[in-house]
Image (cartoon, rainbow, N blue to C red):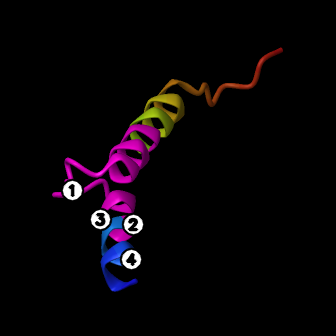
Amino acid sequence: MLRTDAIIDALSRREPVGEHGDPAVSLLRALTDDVDQWLSSVSITPST
């Protein structure tokens, strides 16, 4: 459980995670990247 927490903590801080062969870690990394991209494209200006 501690290892899982360490991986999640590293991903939340956008730090590299050394588990490149683990499909679950790869999926979480891809989801994090996707959310980052979505957040950077969201407009803060309200539409009228």
Q: Which residue is mark 2?
A: 8
Q: Residues within 10 Å of mark 4 (few under 14, many from 20)?
A: few
Please name the amino acid that badge 1 sits on. Glu
How far apart are the alpha carbons under marks 3 and 4? 9 Å
**Pointers 1 and 4 in contact (CB under 8 A)?**
no
Question: In this rendering, which labeled residue sits more in front, label 1 or label 3?
Answer: 1
Mark 1 vs 3, N-terminal side:
3
Q: Which residue is mark 3?
A: 10
Mark 1 vs 4, N-terminal side:
4
How far apart are the alpha carbons under marks 1 and 4? 13 Å
Quadrant containing the C terminus is top right
How far apart are the alpha carbons under marks 2 and 4? 5 Å
Q: Which residue is mark 4?
A: 5
Q: Residues within 10 Å of mark 2 (few under 14, many from 20)?
A: some
**Pointers 2 and 4 in contact (CB under 8 A)?**
yes
Question: In this rendering, which labeled residue sits more in front, label 2 or label 1?
Answer: 1
